Amino acid sequence: MTGHQFLFWVFAAVTCGGAIAVVLTQNVVRMAFWLIVSLGASAGLFFLLNADFVGTAQLLVYVGGTLVLLVFGVMLTASGPFSKMQTRPGELFLAGIVAFLLLGLLGSSVCSVDWDRVVASTNAGQPITTHHALNQGYNRPEEGNTGHPLGMAFLGMRPDRDLAPGTKTLSTGYLLPFEIASVHLLVVLIGAAYLARAKRRIHPNES
Amino acid sequence: MNPASTFGIVQPAFSREGACSLCATQGPTRNLNDMMPLIAANSLGEYVLESLLYWKLPGNESIAFTIAALIHVVLILTFFGVAPLIFIWLERKVAGRIQDRLGPTRVGGRFGWLQTLADGVKLIQKEDLCPADADRMLFRMSPYLVFVASFGAFIALPFGNGFVVQNLEVGLFFMLALMSLEVLGVVFAGYSSGSKWALFGGMREAAQVVSYEIPMAICALVPVIATGSLNLVEVGHFQAGGFWNWLIFQNPFTFVAFFVYFTVATASVKRAPFDLAEAESELVAGFHTEYSGIRWSYFFMAEYASMFAVSGIAVFLFLGGWYDGVGIIESLDRFVSVNGCGWLGQYSVNVIGLAIFIAKGTSLVFFQMWVRWTLPRLRIDQVMMTCLKYLLPISCVLFLGATVWPLFLYSLPMTAKQTDVRPPMGNRVYNPKPAAVKPSEKSHSTSHPAPSAVIIKEGSGKEA
């Protein structure tokens, strides 16, 4: 077993164990803690795949952002000292059915893919591109030199496609989806601020 | 992993910027015609593997990289332990002097320089208490969470030219992400203590840090726009030469961004005047009210190490990284690579750079202490207002300005020749072509056309 495989098994076990602990715990804040463990370990899996940017985004968005808000919300709204989540047997039964159906779906779709062919067609393990414009960061491409290509793709250009020798077309990149998502988030933010602001009205006739 | 063919070969190294030490992580293109021989190791792991092969010791890549990882961990842990030791002593001396006292004077002979160690021994001996009302598991885990988050940030922090555990392409992003996890430990500590004071401290911390993260990230992006890289070693190389090359003097927006960043960073490591989470006069001790002994000291180790981490980011983003500002490091670099002093020469230059970087970071930490003992603590509403109504808009304006600035310079008739719309850093460094623009010449690169424009032309030409 190489070091990579060993680390993969460690991270995979921690991810799954944390996820199971989230389900089995009844205390909401402890759930959040186990969610940290699970999400952090899956970020570790991304780092193991040299997907630095995705792993870091996972840490920042899910662990550093969403979970902090979750815990914050629990702390603000909890009535007792340590809020518990009690599930009734019926809910447990329904949720179990849905979860196992989803598991079956995921498992069957994973098993139905011919992975050898996919791996061969995607050149797994090969650098993301061979074009010189992308190989000039400080890190070698196989060490996760994904910052520049991702940034350019967000700006609306796919360097691995558009700059490859013999390419005649420009692909669209991710600029439009990115902008749509950010405008959507802005709308949500403004709406939340409008709903949450203090409803104090000044009545000049009173007092 | 590198192909084994490069191991064990003494290879001529690359251009001057690439001439890093054994610890360095280097670019893919190697200029074989350069004069300096260097062991062809990209990282400590490869160096260990080479040495194992050289001494005919049993070992494969996994063992070599495990050894390298252990070496890195021990080095960083040592720094992580020693830096708070010194900073806490410094804090007490600074506090004493500012309040017209002497501070610690006796322990360890003069200046009380062993005071922190004595305190540490005392803290280890103390009983590890856990309140009866507390959520035991979370209460015990949260100091480790804070500690690990703060420690993890040091993985991507370069301590000099190539002295970095993992030279991530997204190093800055990684550091900011990991330091944002610290707040979770604090919130858990506040929540699980089963104490009202601690709960208030934790909630204040959550509200404060979540809001201050936004201007911090935006301010950190202002110099990133100027360099085009999130890799802190690249950002450091960008600032070679005199202090006028430092990113703080790059344009007016980075100059303002430094001060905004420093304010926000002070708040994000919960230092006074933003230390609402542990406001002694209101909340006893805030989130760590119920902690004692070694767990309590983990919070403080993490706090002081984080102070150095945010200061280190500031040094790399604004204050020239490991460069001294008068060109000594740069000329030493050039001397070493021209005269072929081997890896030892380059290594010594890097050690000098390390000392300069640590000195700069420490002086920023000192400045944070100075601020702490000079300014009164804000109220919580003032803290939130400062962030959301002032620092956030200011940082957005700075970000916008930094984006528009090169275009603005480009449009002026008198500066159109002197400036170019700069491409990402990666296009200029490690370019084997002779037209490569070295970082030292970046501020007066007049002769080269803007490489980003070249890329655009390339693309549009292909389209047509």
Image (cartoon, grey):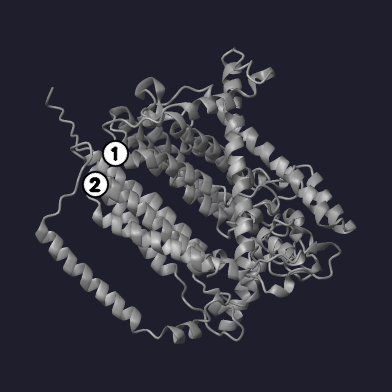
Determine contact: label 2, label 1, CB under 8 Å. yes
Q: Residue visible at 58% across and 17% down?
A: B96
Where the C terminus of chain B falls, by quadrant? Answer: bottom right
Left-right relation of A39 to B170: left
Where in the figure is residue A9, as x and y percent of width and height?
A: 44, 65
Where the N terminus of chain B falls, by quadrant? Answer: bottom right
* Residue B207 appearing in the image: no
Q: Residue visible at 29% across and 50% down?
A: A31
Secondary structure beneath disc 1?
loop
Secondary structure beneath disc 2?
loop
Seen as rendered, the residue at the extreme right is B339
Q: Is B376 located above or below residue B386 in the figure? A: above
Residue B8: quarter of image: bottom right
Q: Is B124 located above or below residue B308 in the figure? A: above
Where in the figure is residue A190, as x and y percent of width and height?
A: 30, 50
Q: Residue visible at 26% across and 51% down?
A: A191
> Numbered disc 2: what chain?
A
* Residue B303 appearing in the image: yes
Q: Inspect the image, locate mark 1, and give the three-letter code of the amino acid beneath it.
A: Asp
Residue under pointer 2: A27
In depth, the one of B285 and B398 nearer the eye is B285
Q: Inspect the image, locate mark 2, and give the three-letter code of the amino acid beneath it.
A: Asn
Q: Is A83 located above or below residue B2 in the figure? A: above
Residue B381: quarter of image: top left
- Circle 2 Cα neighbour tier, 10 Å, few/some/many (<14 / 14–19 / ≥20): some
Q: Residue visible at 32% across and 27% down?
A: B197
Where in the figure is residue A99, as x and y percent of width and height?
A: 22, 68
Residue under pointer 1: B135
Q: Are marks 2 and 1 on the same chain?
A: no
Left-right relation of B91 to A96: right
